[in-house]
Amino acid sequence: MKTVNLKEKFDSFTEYWNPKIVGELNGQLVKVAKFKDEFVMHKHDNEDEMFLVMEGKLLMELDDKTLEINAGEFVVIPKGTNHKPVAVGEVKVMLFEPNTTLNTGNTENDFTVKNLDRI
């Protein structure tokens, strides 16, 4: 058991859209990531995802609307929901997801990261 300093974790990497594992509990991974610009529209057939914005503003494009998530706010994306994260500038995000979650869900492309780093 040890504490996790989120500032140190975010400061330890510079790449975007490449989640890093910082913790694990009950089959869920706690991840941190930096986002910039647009991601890809995708969905997760079997997993819910939680996006907690630590710094910045994240837009979450859905099929029928766009949500704005600001620092200190989070959104849970239910499984089977099409979504596309769009960062306004650089955004620092903490994610809570089952350990089976692929970051691009049902879409594999250049953003797909299959083997996440633990930091």
Image (spheres, rainbow, N blue to C red):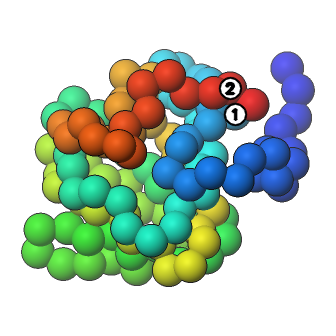
Residue type at mark 1: give it. Val
Residue 101 pos. (x, y %): 36, 30
CB within 8 Å, label 2 to label 1: yes
- For image coordinates 42% across by 25% down, the residue present is 114
- Which of the 4 image quadrants contains residue 112? top left
Whether residue 72 is visible to the viewer of this picture, yes or no, is no
**Few, some or many residues within 10 Å of mark 1 (<14, 14–19, 20+):** some
Residue type at mark 2: give it. Arg
**Few, some or many residues within 10 Å of mark 2 (<14, 14–19, 20+):** few
Whether residue 41 sits left or right of residue 50 in the image: it is left
Q: Earlier in the sequence, mark 2 or mark 1?
A: 1
- Which one is nearer the viewer's eye here, 114 or 31? 114
Per the rendering, the mark at residue 75 is none
- For image coordinates 87% across by 35% down, the residue present is 3
Q: Which residue, given by chain and number where applicable, does mark 2 sit on?
A: 118
Q: Which residue, given by chain and number where applicable, does mark 1 sit on?
A: 22
Relative height, residue 58 to residue 14 (above, below): below
Q: Nearer the viewer, mark 2 or mark 1?
A: 2
Task: Please tell me whether mark 2 sits on a helix, a strand or a loop.
Answer: strand
Whether residue 101 sits left or right of residue 57 in the image: it is left
